Amino acid sequence: MTNKSTILNELMGLGSTLANHSPQNCYAVPDGYFEGLANQIMSRIKAIETTDAGEELEILSPMLSMLSKKTPYSVPAGYFENLEEKILQRLSEHPDYLTSKEEIETLSPVLNRLRNKNPYSVPAGYFENLEAKNKKQEAKIVPINRRRWYRFAAAATIAGIIILGGLLIFGNSRVDVNKDPDKWIAKNVKKKVSSDKINDFVTLAEGDAIISTESQNTDADSAEIKELIKDVPEKEIENFLNDAVALESNDNADALMN
Amino acid sequence: MALTNLSDSELLVEFRNPITKEKAFTAIIKKYQEKLYWHLRRMVVDHEDANDVLQNVMIRVWNGLENFREDSQLYTWLYRVATNECLTFLEQQKKRAAVSLSDVESGLENKIRADRHFDGNKLEWKLQLAIQQLPEKQRLVFQLRYYDEMPYEEMSRVLDTSEGALKASYHHAVKKIEEYIKNH
């Protein structure tokens, strides 16, 4: 079923009398309208896209573009010569109008009095000699390129020193004392502690080691001695000890004498 | 110091200085008087009316230029002031005559024909008559574009209308004028 028949059926269903009239276009279209429409639209598009007013008019209406733009109206002779005076005259007739002098007088009489008073003085003949002075003095020409080279060299040197210093101070990688104790000691101890002090420490350490060894030996010896003298009477041990002390005293006296 | 060779920005600076205000204003008048005059004259036709409107425009400029924000060109602002003043004038004429604006427009057509130099056979006079057939705003658009070659961007600031609408209006105006000239 076509749309047309659908619409007709709908109209008939509504009981409309419109179903009895066949649709006809009562409006007229000028002759040749559609033939020239595409060209007209294209011209319009070109005219819209151009920014030049002359080109735009030429596209829209070649006839108008050929017409002179001179307005045919006449102007009284000398009208523009004195126009500004007439306008100023008319302005001055306005009750609120003030000349610049009157304006400053109204706003600030003090400023108005000071307007033409210049407190600064200029040496005699200053302006006359100024031009001559400027011509005589030639400005010292300093080549920009050389200056710039020096500046870059100085900046690069300073930057290099800073970078090197940073590398020396912070450059070495940290050594873990647990993983590599020898290296850690080599890095942190040997550099900070003098060799003499290390030697003293080693000597002391050896002394302590001997003492601790001796103490360990003494303990072992005393047990052995006890085993050996368990059968010796006590009186004989006392006599032996007394004899040992007397012998030691004699030795000390001899040492003092010598 | 001659101010006539200064740029618009420099003239504004001088205008804002109380000491050079009048000189700067005079320089502005000299710089734009003819452009503004012809813009008004084409709208109101009669010289005396154009002169009145132009002087009203310049008084408005004197009062308003201090607050000009320079967000557009000076001459764009001047054109805007002139256009508004012109439309106000035509509106007042309508009220004075107590007739519709279309009658005012036919009155303008009569003024053209009443000009002592009028010659209906000459194309430039036919063009003026054709222009007067246009609606007021369309007339403005046509004149600003055709005579002053004003860019649409600036015209949109003068007339407070979008560029697209102005382009469409101008294109229609050109067609209407062409049709009028061909038929008369």
Image (cartoon, grey):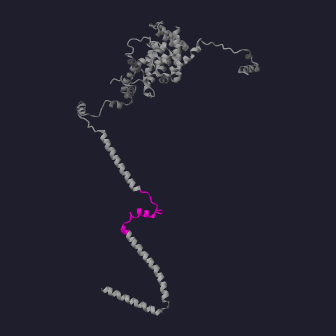
Task: Provide the residue span drawn in magenta.
Answer: A172-197
- In the picture, residue B116 is in which quadrant? top left
Q: Residue at x 46, y 15 (%)?
A: B41
Q: Residue at x 74, y 15 (%)?
A: A20
Q: Residue at x 34, y 48 (%)?
A: A157
Give the quadrant of the C terminus of chain A.
bottom left
- In the picture, residue A7 is in which quadrant? top right
* B120 up-or-down from A80: above or below: above
Residue A257 percent location from the top left of the image: 30, 86
Residue A214 percent location from the top left of the image: 44, 79
Residue B123 percent location from the top left of the image: 47, 9
Give the quadrant of the N terminus of chain A.
top right
Residue A174 part of the magenta-drawn span: yes
- Give the side of residue A49 with respect to residue A200, left or right: right
Can residue A208 be seen in this snapshot?
yes
Residue A166 percent location from the top left of the image: 39, 53
